[in-house]
Image (spheres, helix red, strand yellow):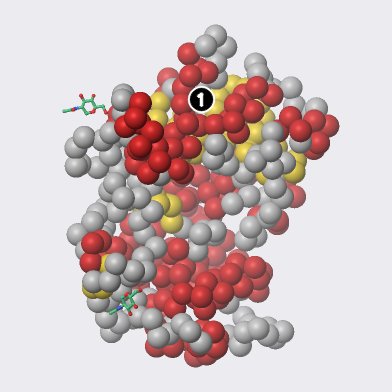
Amino acid sequence: MEGWKLLVTVGWLFPTCQGYDPKNILVLGGNGFIGAATSERLIARGDNLVLVNRGNWYWDSHSTVKPHVKHLTCDRQRQLRHCEDLRRFKDFVYFDVVVDFSAYHSEAVEDVLDLLKGRVGRYIYISSDSVYEVCSKNHSNPSRESDAVRPMNAEEKLQMAGKDDYGHRKLECEEVLVRQRQEEGGVPYVLLRLPDVIGPRDNTYRWWMYQMWLRLSGYLERQISIPKFLMDQKLSFVYSLDVADMVVKLTDCELGKFDNAYNLGTDEMPTLLEVLELMKRQLNLENTHIPVNDSAEAIYLFPSVKLGPVDSSKAKDMLNWTPTSFETISRQTIRFYEFAIRNKGFVLARKEIIRNMQAYFTKQPHNVLYGLNGVYGIKYPDTHDEL
Ligand SMILES: *[C@@H]1O[C@H](CO)[C@@H](O)[C@H](O)[C@H]1NC(C)=O
Ligand SMILES: *[C@@H]1O[C@H](CO)[C@@H](O)[C@H](O)[C@H]1NC(C)=O
């Protein structure tokens, strides 16, 4: 635990500046993957945080985040004005910043703007490169921010929206923020369009599953492979901790950067095979062969979009976006999961990764447990110390 803590701390040493004027920040979500990392940074800076989420404290956020924030339990699937915790909450009259990690439909954004009308300084919305999937991108280069334009033709627009419901809804959230800004008293916004996010404490477990798939390959019937159609496909990724750093920066930067969308991706655009080959090298598993799989059913966990990588040059120009190198991200991420599988503090995450491995990669659930024992020396489930 401590070893990992030290490792990440180096990357985000904050000068807890003398005379820093703490901000009131409303974080919607803030308990998950990028959200918890962002909350940790804001806490370290000394801001006053109000977190609104359903109260699932993922990974170790119950100790790194929960004790240091005001927590309100609300479910954004329901209207916020019906949320008892929020209705009773009267401490803050004004939020300098809203950071929204958890809006997946437009009403969720409208709700917040409605409820806090005239009481928000700026709004940072975590969006997705999936928005490009429902737009009429008309070139084959990496997606640029200006490509997020829906087809003019109503029928075509509807048809595109149907292709990717998630992307359609995330774009609707963006559209609410853009529209309200044009009205009087509208809140300045920033839209951060993220490709596949990787890093420690990922609740999708995608990176960790690949890592375990490589590590336990000698114990699993289903061998790792690359679907043929992805052989030459370049992918975009972003490091969760780079995003957290950027959000912190945006809570404080000039408003001139606002009212914009930004893609945030790594400089490298590796293929899936390149990602897995690097993972192999860093895990010292050089002898594991990763074949091509012709089957249309071949399992793959990246990418989550069809449209290819994103172009982050706008963020580089305007926000001085300087992403961590893919090799470093990979090394740090691998190191975290190698540590996490042995760490009893992550009971739930470990249970879930084991269940996932059992569901997808073997017909014999015991093989995963034999693998854990053989590779990591972990007897699971157990009641003994593992570290
Ligand atoms: C491509 O789409 C953009 C908007 O997304 C538009 O401005 C541009 O004119 C289009 N170019 C062509 C060649 O259709
Ligand atoms: C390819 O994928 C299919 C479907 O998931 C699987 O049954 C098969 O074993 C895979 N073949 C290789 C060579 O990995």
> As drawn, is 71 to the left or to the right of 42?
right
Q: Residues within 10 Å of mark 1 (few under 14, many from 20)?
A: some
Q: Quadrant of the N terminus?
A: bottom right
| Residue topped by disc 1 | 176
The quarter of the rendering in which ligand 2 is drawn is bottom left
Give the amino acid at mark 1.
Answer: Val
> As drawn, is 307 to the left or to the right of 70?
left
Q: Nearer the viewer, residue 19 or 62?
A: 62
Q: Residue at x 51, y 25 (%)?
A: 176
Question: Residue 209: which quarter of the image?
Answer: bottom left
Compared to residue 154, the image places residue 242 above or below, namely: below
Q: Residue furthest front?
A: 155
Q: Quadrant of the C terminus?
A: bottom right
Compared to residue 163, the image places residue 80 above or below, namely: above
Mark 1 secondary-structure assignment: helix
| Image location of residue 326, percent across then percent down | 33, 57
